[in-house]
Amino acid sequence: MTTRSLDMDIIESADINRMENGSGTGKLPKMTSTRQKILKRFLRHRLAMLGMVILLVLYLSAFFADFLSPYGADSSVVNQAHYPPTAVQMFHKGKFTGPFYYHMRKRNTAGAGEIPVFKLFRDSSIRYPIEFFAKGQPYKFMFLIPTERHLFGAGAPINDQGQKMDLPAGEKPNRLYIWGADIQGRDLYTRLLFGGRISLTVGIMAIMISYPIGLLMGGIAGYFGGWVDTAIMRLVEAIIAFPSLYLLLTLSATLPGNLTSIQRYLAVIGILSFIGWAGQARIYRGQVLSLRQMEYVEAARSVGMKDVPIIIKHIIPQMSSWIIVSATISIPAYTLGEAALSFLGLGIQDPESSWGLMLKESQNIVLVKDHPWLLIPGFAIVLTVFGFNFFGDGLRDAFDAKKQI
Amino acid sequence: MLRYVLKRFIQMIPLLLIISFIAFGIIRMAEVYANADPLAQLKMSPTTTAETLARERERLALDKPFIVRYVIWLKNFSTGNMGESYAYKAPVSTLILSRLWNTAVLGFATLILTWLVAIPLGIFLSVRQYSFVDQVFSSVSYFFMGFPDFFLAIIFLLFAAVTGWFPIGGMTASNHSDMSSFGQFIDVGHHLILPALTLALISIANLQRRMRANMLDVLGEEYIKTARAKGLSENKVIYKHAVRNAINPIVTLLGFEIAGLVSGAAFVEIIFNWPGLGNMMLQAVLGTDLNLVMAGLIISSFMLLMGNLIADVLLGVVDPRIKLEA
């Protein structure tokens, strides 16, 4: 369909009213460009708005991870493994004191000679006030401004009278674990925010690699046809024929063990893109096959334009809305790919954090039974997937991608 | 039909060659970059003699150039000699066959569950379009379509651990070999429920939506109006006229589902510790059991291609309008 028909079916209802009433004495309805109409349709899509809000919250929290989190991503407390989410209190002995939490002490409840069973006991005589804009680990705010203020953090322990006190010998101050602690006593909330920096960017980075490759290969195959087409498409078919998780596993076996964390991050992106480009190439080839017979392509060729510039300048822009939509919709697959690899211990490695890696602990289901907060990273993954799905669906409806091509 | 299938098989050969070449290249990359030693497992075993090592080195032609090695491997593989898994100390072919069987059991159970639920559900919802039930199910299936399978598997496993109603992973209980054959059957079935349910929930969401959409298309056709006009009962209209036409395109999905189950089940197998192909593949990769990795890649790709072929053939069978050209 042409853009004209698209314009026709999205005349704003307000405009229709004005036309029908004729109140505007010969005034023409306000003109809106196609782009404005698409934007309007998108903004009216409720689910898409929800998706956008979800994604905005997730990405912002990852970007400001070091400000929002009270501790460093890898700062651990050895004997506070699997501490439950801290119970934040407001009233101490019936009196309002502002947010604080009580000291917890690990004690062996089993008798002598038995297998030790550790339980946590609350000590109400020791309190930790929660401070806002508290001083903590130094970092660079927005990667620029060096500071050591965090949104919130735990203060020094105080006693019943509210005076600063020293803990009994051999005890370490309790941390503020709003979402519990992992096996190394690291704050799950902190790791989740920092993990988002990896889990949320892998998909976008991989798309930025696999899409151009897929586009170019698909474009070349569809445009030139003949043996070039055959060669590229055989390769594409072969890659698609591999079950993706099997290929993912095998490719991860090629990663050397001594990679730095940033190299590993890039390698994971590389692996995901290697698997992803083939599917795109196949789809674009089909699109190009139909587009190359269009008159404007013929015209470009007849004025002596070279083939590759025609693909890049005339054919790819024609598919741009379609590309944006399908890219958005395919991001979750990459996110899940990274989660899968890290979950199986083949992707991102400790001490770096990623949601899949954090979920790795829940492979031991008995552990999860006792410490259900270990599942929180999984919900973050689910939220991301749905955020992109909602957002992508909205984009598709707004662009009306199906109709256009 | 036979000619068509035969032709497709012949077309598959060059594709399988490319697939095996890529797979071989990846394994070679693992050897070079990750220092994955194909004989590592063999060397670790105390019973390995220098003779066996030399023999395996000879068989894999480790000191020859890449292309020579590939050709030798291809010759061995096509005659059924897939080498030996050093970790399991068994021929790769028998290992894969037994694992493939387990994957097939899981896949088959999933398939039956999916079809038994999704088709009636799709029909039920299509005749109640936009009703409250329909809207609830459409949101629920949207939810499951997007829900990551491995996380669903973890949640189900947690359910098993908390309630104790189901075994926590695995395929058989520890006393499986002592049971009667009926007891063994029940035991496997008991282990099968949760992994099959995990996989089925996601496919039900998909299939149910398609069935519903197809039904709605068909219900708008003229011949349905005719059937109603000549006074047929609503049951006859729906089950005799509409369902039969709506189910045709769905049948082709069966083939794709067979293909999808090989790859889609892998992650769920790993989490439920189901001894299938996907689980084996992970162990093989972790243990640099390269013979096994290679064979697993090829076999699983072959299964995928077969699934696609079945899909195309089924389409020709159920829809006489489509001619399969040989």
Image (tube, grey):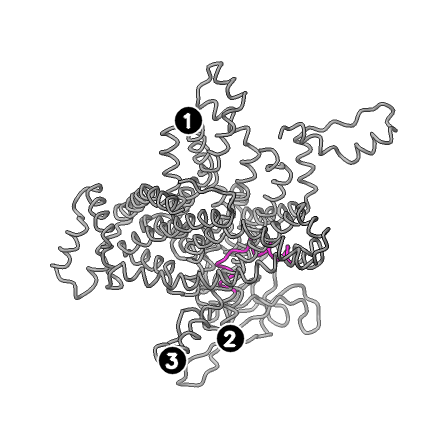
Magenta segment's dominant SS is helix
Q: Where residue B128 sits: x, y (%)?
A: 69, 56
**Cα gap from disc 3 to disc 2, whole angstroms:** 21 Å
Residue contact at pointers 2 and 1, CB within 8 angstroms:
no
From which residue to which does the magenta span run?
B137-155
Labels in figure, total: 3
Pinpoint the chain carrying mark 2.
B
Look at label 3 and name its amino acid. Answer: Ser
Residue A234 numbered mark, or none: none
Based on the picture, tell me whether residue A254 belongs to the magenta stretch.
no
Task: Name the residue carrying label 1.
Answer: A224
Look at label 2 and name its amino acid. Answer: Trp
Based on the picture, tell me whether residue B139 belongs to the magenta stretch.
yes
Observer-nearest of A127 and A237: A237
Question: Counting other residues with Cα less than 10 Å from the Cα at mark 2, is it few (<14), some (14-19), or many (20 or more)?
Answer: few
Q: Where residue B101 sits: x, y (%)?
A: 36, 63
Residue B180 numbered mark, or none: 3
Residue contact at pointers 3 and 1, CB within 8 angstroms:
no
Name which of mark 3 and mark 2 comes first in the sequence.
2
Which residue occupies 71% across, 34% down? A10
Mark 3: secondary structure: loop
Image quarter (top left, top right, bottom left or bottom right) of the N terminus of chain A: top right
Observer-nearest of A276 and A402: A402
Image quarter (top left, top right, bottom left or bottom right) of the C terminus of chain A: top right
Look at label 1 and name its amino acid. Answer: Phe
Specify whether B214 is left or right of B13.
right
Residue B165 numbered mark, or none: 2
